[in-house]
Amino acid sequence: MRNNRQKEHAGGSYMLSEIGNRLDGGELSSEEAKEASEEMSLSLAALRSAGEISNDAYLDAGVIQGGISVLSNMIDQGCNKEELLAHLNQLRQRADRICLAHPGLAEYFD
């Protein structure tokens, strides 16, 4: 049985799951990854400005946003699928740790 914190945490990697599904199916373009990164950047900045997340949460979440940007660059560079999936798995692990430290961020990774 999961507690509330685990439930919040579990929802935090939805965006990464969708990216992973598209990547695994060979459907994720560099442009799509770049757009996801930019959208996350704008959303996080708005949340921080509105006081909905702390500066620490903003900085921690920026690691995931930056990692998605790196994924876009890796696609542009022609990295193979295994390398791309390994990078994405590292992002998922980081997102899990960040959501444990900042449970309120889980919904914003969507």
Image (cartoon, helix red, strand yellow):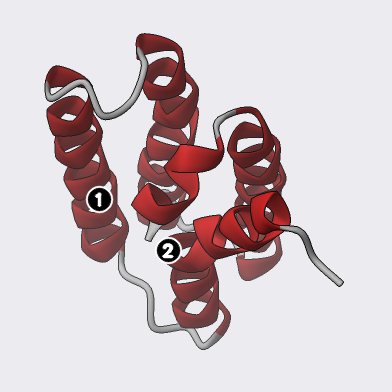
User: Above or below — where is 6 with respect to 53?
Assistant: below
Estimate how packed mark 2 is, as few (under 14), some (14 to 19) or many (20 or more) residues with alpha carbons within 10 Å: some
Marks 1 and 2 sit apart, C-alpha to C-alpha, by 13 Å
Q: Amino acid at mark 2?
A: Met
Please identify the quadrant where the N terminus is shown: bottom right
In front: 50, or 27? 50
* Element type where label 2 sits in the image: helix
Q: Which residue is mark 1?
A: 34
* Element type where label 1 sits in the image: helix
Looking at the image, which residue sits at the far right? 1
Q: Which residue is mark 2?
A: 15
Tell me what residue is drawn at x 36 percent, y 17 percent: 54
Residue 110 horizontal/vertical position (percent): 37, 61
In front: 39, or 52? 52
Residue 19 horizontal/vertical position (percent): 45, 68
Estimate how packed mark 1 is, as few (under 14), some (14 to 19) or many (20 or more) residues with alpha carbons within 10 Å: some
Tell me what residue is drawn at x 32 percent, y 57 percent: 33
110 sits left or right of 36 in the view: right
Q: Amino acid at mark 1?
A: Lys
